[in-house]
Image (tube, grey):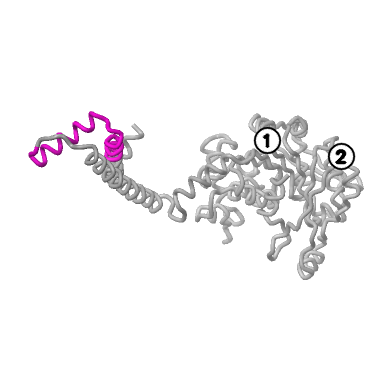
Amino acid sequence: MKLWKWLYPGLGIKRWFVIGILALLLLSTGIALLLQINIVDYIIKGIYEIVTGLSGTLNYYTNMVIGIVLIIISLALLTYAGNRFVKKLNEEIYKDDDFVNVLFKKNQLQKGPKIVALGGGTGLSNLLRGLKEFSSNITALVTVADDGGSSGKLRNELDILPPGDIRNCIVALADKETLMEDLFQYRFHKEGDLRGHSFGNLFIAAMTEVLGDFEESVEESSKVLAIRGKVIPSTNEKVNLGAVYEDGSEIIGESEIPNFNKKIKKVFLKPGDVEITEKTKNAILEAEYILVGPGSLYTSLIPNLLVKNMSETIEKSSAKKVFINNIMTQPGETTDHSASDHLKAINQHIGKNLFEYIVINKNGSNKKLLKKYAYEGAYPVRDDRDILNNLGIKVIDANLIQTGDFIRHDPYKLAKIILDI
């Protein structure tokens, strides 16, 4: 029945199908004549007698000429019909690209490596923008401890998991820039109940209400933007993030943790027994690359690894395990942290060293931009590779900074250096 839909009136492609079929018939007839297949010879002879009114046998050379002419005509018709069919698809479906290019790229991306990336915030979404150019076999595992801004409001009012970081990852993995992406990221600014909410967050929240399941709503929302890969919450259970500071004080709430500008001793999940989903487990065990970072160390990266069975499953995986270090320190969270301090913090929380590789940036940004960051209390993360080497981790360094008004990783450069491992 699906094949018959191609013959529906008004599609504007039936004529090219008919011409294509006619061309194939002519091509097969021409080849048959060249191969001297008797039945075709009799048919051509009959047609010749009907048209000319003359009887007789066509000789070998006449058949050869007719066969060659039919092949040339058929190839011309096939080329014409094929071009018109592809043009129609480009006009109606692939307006900004070529159908053949799209098909080729899609097939190439499907052959790409299986990648699992863990994190949250802008760091993970920035990484995904680069990875999607090399593979569509990407699974983004996103922290669900966010309790600030639009996500926090929806979480409290609708009793759902926070959609903000998940929305950013869905947009980052979108096949190409579209108006729908801009709509997903649009944030309401006028006074009222919608102020501060993004449309994408409201869309995911509404989808959750309709379907009754947050993970399913993320999957269906992903289809709207035709993303390359999958976005999965690290756990389907509601969880809060807490922190204990060096002075012994404690705070609950992911958005509150960096505000006190105290040195963090450890972070924890509340409740502490939330588990990874079966989809998460399968993605990790099947992965060829497992990437952690870049992102806020204590509020985006470590929370994912604290989910029950997460670090154990990563340890069992045969994938290459890569930690992507931040370029800059984060005030109130990783002040004065070196590259090895980031790794040590993770190891102390999960009780093991998961990583084989660490990716660090080796060149600084321009002085004017560094001065701007210094004013806010952020500095380049120190490269202490002597300590990293003692931890048994392989250091990969490169100039990974994206030119612009902010100091952040270049998505394409970062993805390429990871996949070159």
> How far from the left and from the top, in percent, is residue 356?
80, 40
- Mark 1, secondary structure of its residue: loop
Give, as a three-letter code, the residue at label 1.
Ala
Residue drawn 69% across the image and 66% down it? 405
Residue drawn 76% across the image and 48% down it? 324
Residue drawn 86% across the image and 52% down it? 338
- Mark 2, secondary structure of its residue: helix
Residue drawn 49% across the image and 48% down it? 102
Q: Quadrant of residue 228?
A: top right
Does residue 401 show up magenta in the picture? no
The dominant secondary structure in magenta is helix
Magenta span covers which residues? 25-54
Residue labelled with disc 2: 348
Which mark, residue 287?
1
Q: Is residue 96 visible?
A: yes
Q: Is residue 76 left or right of residue 95?
A: left
Is the residue marked by circle 2 packed among few (<14), some (14-19), or many (20+) residues within 10 Å?
few
Is the residue marked by circle 1 packed among few (<14), some (14-19), or many (20+) residues within 10 Å?
many
> How far from the left and from the top, in percent, is residue 65?
25, 44
Residue at mark 2 to residue at mark 1: CA–CA distance: 25 Å
Q: Is residue 159 visible?
A: no
Q: Earlier in the sequence, mark 2 or mark 1?
A: 1
Which mark, residue 231?
none
Does residue 34 show up magenta in the picture? yes
Q: Is residue 260 left or right of residue 30?
A: right
> How far from the left and from the top, in percent, is residue 96?
46, 56
- The quarter of the rendered structure image containing the N terminus is top left
- The quarter of the rendered structure image containing the C terminus is top right
The correct choice, above or below, for 222 with respect to 2 in the image is below
